[in-house]
Image: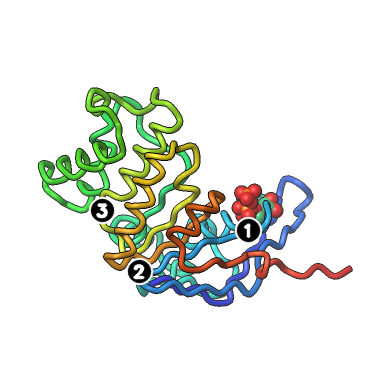
Amino acid sequence: MIDIRDVSKSFTLHNQGGAVIRVMEGASLHVAPGECVALTGASGAGKSTLMRVIYGNYLAASGSVLVGGLDVARAEPREILRLRREVLGYVSQFLRVVPRVPTVEVVAEPLLALGVDPHTARARAEVLLRRLNIPERLWSLSPTTFSGGEQQRVNIARGFAHAYPALLLDEPTASLDAENRAVVLGLIAEAKARGAAIVGIFHDVEARERVCDRVVDVSGFTPVVAA
Ligand SMILES: Nc1ncnc2c1ncn2[C@@H]1O[C@H](COP(=O)(O)OP(=O)(O)OP(=O)(O)O)[C@@H](O)[C@H]1O
């Protein structure tokens, strides 16, 4: 489902004399349907960079990044938008929403974008919000004023609203209490059981051990710098 081959990525800092930072070389990763792979490696090793390359936010300099058969490294912007709508979900650490949109609509939005009828989309959103212990009195309010943990749970509900065949998870259990953490691990396990291919960053080691089948240390993709 996710097949990364020989990817390299560097950044050119145009505002700092054109300094080039080589972050990744020869990165390869295969994630099968139903499999969850955790990216590990020290801070700055390139975990977030690899996630962004898969999502198409960062363009790989070389290699291929196949997600559901589409090479994200070569795809047109409209193909990437379609991929994100239908195939590839991304639960980032922080919720970004348009102000004043009610929580229930924030969660239902990915389904509405797919053409699911509003009643079904809303019902699915409500099931997730209830499961993630967001009090019903908050559903009609914008999540912009919610606590950090509440916002993260709204973000997770939104990320799991559609049954994406592939999912990127950036620290999905950070800042959650034990009960909600268990709910999120349950959602991840269910996504795997229906065949989702998942790549994630899990600093929560226990969570990682519970849901991940494999660990890939991205330090192995760090370019060797000549002395
Ligand atoms: N947009 C960017 N412009 C310039 N350099 C960048 C950019 N994004 C990432 N980098 C560099 O790439 C390297 C890898 O960063 P990345 O955020 O992927 O690491 P990480 O493993 O996710 O770290 P952490 O665990 O601290 O979040 C760092 O040296 C970082 O400075």
Q: Is mark 1 within 8 Å of ligand 1?
A: yes
Q: Earlier in the sequence, mark 1 or mark 3?
A: 1
User: Circle 1 is placed at which residue position?
Assistant: 46
In terms of secondary structure, where does tag 3 sit? loop
Mark 2: few/some/many CA within 10 Å (<14, 14-19, 20+): some
Q: Position of residue 98 (x, y in %)?
A: 35, 32
Image quadrant containing the C terminus: bottom right
Dot 1: few (<14), some (14–19), or many (≥20) neighbours within 10 Å? many
How far across and how far down the image is residue 226, in percent? 85, 70
Q: Which mark is residue 162?
A: 3
Q: CA distance from mark 3 to mark 2?
A: 16 Å
- Which amino acid, mark 1? Gly
**Number of the front mark, 2 or 1:** 2
Quarter-wise, where is residue 152 in the image? Answer: top left
Instruction: Kindly indicate the quadrant of the structure image that contains residue 42.
Output: bottom right
Residue at the spot of label 2: 34
Which callout, 3 or 2, points at the residue further toward the start of the chain?
2
Q: Amino acid at mark 3?
A: His
Question: Which residue does the image show at 45% across and 38% down from the upper left?
Answer: 176
Query: Which mark is drawn over residue 91?
Result: none
The image quarter containing residue 63 is: bottom right
In the rendered image of this protein, does residue 155 appear above or below residue 53?
above
